[in-house]
Amino acid sequence: MAALRTEGSVIEAEQLLVLGSVVRAIRENAALLSEVRAKAPRVAALYVERHASSKRSGKEDERKINRELLPKWGARKAAEIRRRDVIDLLDGIK
């Protein structure tokens, strides 16, 4: 598997792709759910339900969400998550 080097840590390309698609889905669904001010866990659950469940890597997506995203963003409103937050999250993955 190809790897990318960012600020001293190695991040597998696969992780970047999965996390990138999760973040995009969170942002897209956050716009749809802005009336209810959805928090990241709710939007992540919608991603798993609507998108990951139909992918062969769906269980792995869900595992990465639970391991990497929710511990850091769980209490935040999904609409508040910005590009800098994604960069910081990816830089922290070892």
Image (cartoon, rainbow, N blue to C red):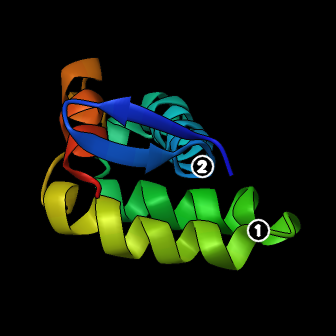
Which residue corresponds to mark 1? 57
In the rendered image, the quadrant that contains the C terminus is bottom left
Q: Amino acid at mark 2?
A: Val
SS for dot 1: loop
Residue 8, position in %: x, y? Answer: 20, 38
Count of labels shown? 2
Q: Is residue 53 above or below residue 14?
A: below
Q: Is residue 81 visible?
A: no
* Label 2 crowd (10 A; few <14 / some 14-19 / many >=20): some
Disc 1 from disc 2: Cα separation: 9 Å
> As drawn, is 69 to the left or to the right of 22?
left
Residue 49, position in %: x, y? Answer: 68, 68
Q: Which residue in the rendered view is the most extreme toward the top?
A: 83
Closest to the observer, 60 or 32:
60
- What is the number of the mark on residue 18? 2
Q: Is residue 7 visible?
A: yes
- What is the number of the mark on residue 7? none
Q: Amino acid at mark 1?
A: Ser
* Label 1 crowd (10 A; few <14 / some 14-19 / many >=20): few
Closest to the observer, 61 or 93:
93
Residue 80, position in %: x, y? Answer: 20, 30
Cβ atoms under marks 1 and 2 closer than 8 Å: yes
Residue placed at 43% from the left, 65% from the top? 65
> As drawn, is 16 to the left or to the right of 66?
right
> As drawn, is 79 to the left or to the right of 59?
left
SS for dot 2: helix
Residue placed at 63% from the left, 49% from the top? 14
Q: Is residue 72 above or below residue 59?
A: above
Residue placed at 59% from the left, 42% from the top? 13
Residue 3, position in %: x, y? Answer: 54, 42
